[in-house]
Image (cartoon, rainbow, N blue to C red):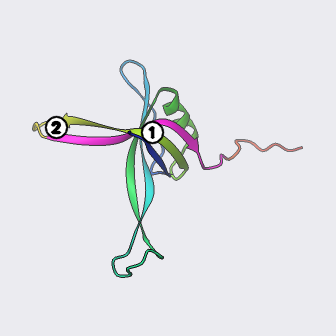
Amino acid sequence: MNSVHIIGRLTKNPVLRKTKNGRDILRFVIKIERKIMKASEGSNDNPAVVPDYIPCFASDSKAVAIADNMEEGHRIGITGHLQSYMHLDKSNMEHYQVEVYVDTYDFLTPRKPKYLVVP
C-alpha cells in the first residue's frame, strides 16, 4: 500500500510549468507540523511542534487548479502516493528525491471574492 494523506500550507506561490509535450505540471512544497515529545518533560501533554517540508507534484488539470486557486500560506489537503526517482549530477553522483504525487486535493483556505456583490 502506498497512500499519503497530508494537510499543510504552501510555502511559496505555485508556478505552473509546461513540459516539452505541452503537459501542465506543478511542483510545490507543503509545510506540515509534526508533534514530538519533549525529552525533558517525559509526558506527551505538551508536545513540541516541528515543521516538515514535503515536496509535491501535480499534473494536468490538478496542476492548473492548484496553481489558479492557491497562494503562499494557503492550506491544502492532499491525498496521493509517494514516488521516488534518482538523477545523476554533473560529477556522476546519485541524488534521490521523494515526492508526493497528488491524486486528489481539497482547498482548505476560503477564497476571497474577486468582486463585491451589493444588493
Label located before the other in sequence (2 or 1): 1
Residue sticking out furthest to the left = 91
Q: Which residue is drawn at 55% across and 51% down?
A: 75
Magenta span dominant secondary structure: strand
| Residue drawn 27% across the image and 41% down it | 97
Residue type pointed to by label 2: Asp
Query: At which x and y percent is residue 34?
Result: 42, 61
Indicate the quadrant containing the C terminus: top left, top right, bottom left or bottom right: top right
Q: Which of 106 and 64 is in front in this view?
A: 106
Name the amino acid, label 1.
Gly
Looking at this view, is 72 or 80 the one in front?
A: 80
Q: Give the range drawn in magenta.
A: 94-111
Q: Circle 1: is it few (<14), some (14-19), or many (20+) Cα within 10 Å?
A: many
Counting from the top left corner in percent of width and height, residue 104 is at 52, 36
| Place of residue 87 in the rendered image (x, y in percent of width and height, measured from the top left) | 20, 35
Tag 1, which secondary structure? Answer: strand
> Mark 2 = which residue?
89
Q: In the image, 69: left or right of 28?
A: right
Quadrant where the N terminus lies? top left
Residue drawn at (54%, 39%) of the image: 105
Q: Find disc 1 in the rendering and name its residue.
A: 80
